[in-house]
Amino acid sequence: MKKIFMMEITQPIGTFYIGKMLAKDIVKISTVNQRKGDSGHQRQLREKRAKEIAMYCSDPDATFPTPIILSIAKEDFTEEPCNIPGIKCFSYVETKKIAELLDGQHRVAGIAQVKDCDFELPVIVMFDLREEQKAYVFATINGNQIKVDRSLIYDLYALNEGRSPYKTCHQIAKIMNSDIGSPFYRRLKMLERRENVTETISQNIFVTKLCELISKNPQQDAILLKNGRLLEDNALLVFRKYFKDKQDEVILRILTNYFGAAATVFKKEWNNPQKYILTKTVGFSGLMAALSDLVPAGECAGDLSKEFFIQIFQNLKQRLRQENSALTSEFFPSSSQGATKLSKLILDSSSLSNFS
């Protein structure tokens, strides 16, 4: 038998108890009643999410402050004498599946994948709930959550003292948005708040697309760096080597040259987002996608200057004229297909340049 000390809490739904348990003990006693047909209330387990949580457990700053909620039959939790005011003591069989997970399925599944996981988790125990009450608790917790905007998440990475892909990308976004000489000066919606009509690309999109050129798994890379581990190379990620070598200024310079060239060649389109797509999400996404091939080409030529990129965009401009096309939503719809079309056209145009 194992003992647990808990505090009693009374709310409209009834009385429940809050305490703490070792993560491995929760794994031992809990089950999940997933929704199948007309029974069960839990969603299906997302293995990817569970693996992300397992990886997160290796973060030296890992934290799980939100309680795991368990439904348990009163007969499986025996109340024991306790002389601590306001505290109750219960005993239970630690090798028996006595608890049904009402909230925390993915946390528990992820933690279960970690060997020797011995940290504590807050738990809430609710006794003798009917099936409709279990479903109500689950629906209330998961149905009323408001997702935090990704731009705010990226902004908060700046408070981290260590390095991470998201922090670097956020810092580059802030510099490019605030530097009067930058092609993106006052063009990014920082924290998703538009303060100027020229702000047509969200901080979220800018950071996300830039991070895709640095890391396949930014969270994992951040944890590895926290633990003093080296990041693996990946030639497909064109800015990864610069990030690994702490050459964030090189990434910034390449981006400034690249987008500065686009703004120079397509001045009218760059400064008129109401009519053209170049400084909208579809245009920015297409431009960023093309960098995966353009940066290696420029490195081979020993030239990633603004002039190098100007030649490419001049070729693109000529190509658009030849095809009687324009950088508008008529030819590049606001979708992934539109971004892919623009990226392909840029790369086709770049083949006209001399990289050797």
Image (cartoon, grey):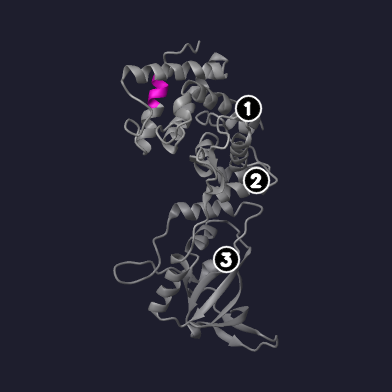
Identify which amino acid the numbered label 3 is placed on: Thr
x, y percentage for residue 272? 45, 32
Q: CA distance from mark 1 to mark 2?
A: 19 Å
Seen in the picture, residue 13 relative to 166 is either above or below; the reply is below
Q: Residue at x 62, y 42 (%)?
A: 167
Quadrant of the snapshot with the N terminus: bottom right
Q: CA distance from mark 3 to mark 1?
A: 40 Å
User: Would residue 98 be seen by someone viewing this image from the given angle?
Assistant: no
Q: Secondary structure at mark 3?
A: loop
Q: Which circle, 3 or 1, is nearer the viewer?
A: 1
Marks 3 and 1, the one that precedes in the sequence: 3
Marks 1 and 2, the one that precedes in the sequence: 2
* Labels in figure, total: 3
Q: Which residue is mark 2?
A: 158
Marks 2 and 3, the one that precedes in the sequence: 3
Query: Callout 1 environment at 10 Å: few (<14), some (14 to 19), or many (20+)?
Result: few
Question: Which region is colored magenta?
Answer: 344-348
User: Would residue 179 be seen by someone viewing this image from the given angle?
Assistant: yes
Identify which amino acid the numbered label 1 is placed on: Val
Identify which amino acid the numbered label 2 is placed on: Ala
Seen in the picture, residue 264 relative to 278 is either above or below; the reply is above
Q: Secondary structure at mark 1?
A: helix
Residue 346 belongs to magenta span: yes
Query: Callout 2 environment at 10 Å: few (<14), some (14 to 19), or many (20+)?
Result: some
Q: Which residue is mark 1?
A: 250
x, y percentage for residue 305? 57, 18
Q: Residue at x 51, y 19 (%)?
A: 309
Q: Residue at x 48, y 20 (%)?
A: 265
Q: Which residue is mark 3?
A: 66
